[in-house]
Amino acid sequence: MRLWVLTLVQAHFAILAVADTTVAVEETTKAANETTTPDGPHADCFLCAPTVQCGETVEGDYSSGEVNVLLMKPMEDNDYFIVKGEVFPNAMKIFIDIYKDLSVGKAQEGGNNQPRLLTFEHYFDTNLTFSRSNLHGEGVPDSFREATLPDAIKQKKPWTLMFKMKDGLSAFETGDETGWFNNDIPWNGTATTQSFNIRGGWKTTSIQYICVNSTLPIL
């Protein structure tokens, strides 16, 4: 009888030990998962940003006033990127800012804008589009272009916009799904660009980067 009771006690403690070990393993696994898998993509990353390589097309919505889209190679003459997106029904205007050099992270930091090389604005109520360039960040733009698009873009799914570097790194040309507009938007000097920001009443469906020379520089 005494031996049977002792056996039961030993079995009880063995079960408790296994249970404690299982709980410890589960808690360790849970803690590891919490540190390596944040809630949502890049939830704990301040400077995470979408990147696009030469010849690559990235699908999804990358329209945000907080984060810039990064090109993996600085734009050279005749390099261009294509943005496709859908406009929200209640949209009033959209913006695309192309930045001088390489701007990483939030599009606005401490209330100060990062250096914008070119700004594209479209207003849906008038179908007017404004493009302005500014190499040195001064008040007066280097160039200003105003255009009225022939067709409303709200019904286009997706809507397409293209930006091409031209003229010895001194101008951009814009276009849509029908081709290029032949509307060079120059600035006073030469400049490189490697990032842009999309915001306003629309979302992107894809971004594509086309390079004449796809060889990455050796860093």
Image (cartoon, grey):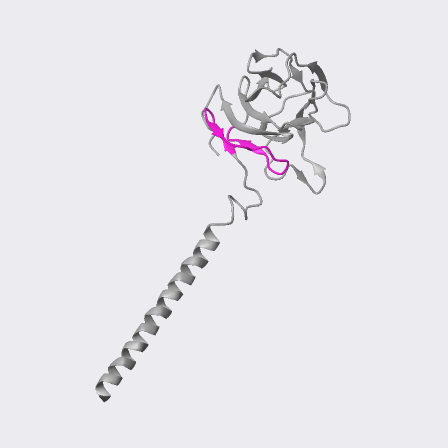
| Residue drawn at (70%, 27%) of the image | 92
Q: Is residue 79 visible?
A: yes
Residue 85: give x, y in percent of width and height: 56, 25
Q: Is residue 78 above or below residue 18?
A: above
Q: Is residue 35 above or below residue 150?
A: below
Most foreground residue, 159 or 164: 159
**How many labels were placed on the picture?**
0
| Residue drawn at (57%, 42%) of the image | 47
Residue 87: give x, y in percent of width and height: 61, 26
Question: Left or right: 54 with respect to 119?
Answer: left
Question: Left or right: 17 with respect to 63?
Answer: left
Q: Is residue 114 above or below residue 18?
A: above
Q: Is residue 53 visible?
A: no
Q: Main secondary structure of the magenta part?
A: loop
Residue placed farthest to the right in the image? 139
Give the magenta part as a residue range. 51-73
Q: Is residue 64 magenta?
A: yes
Question: Left or right: 12 with respect to 151?
Answer: left
Residue 117: give x, y in percent of width and height: 66, 26
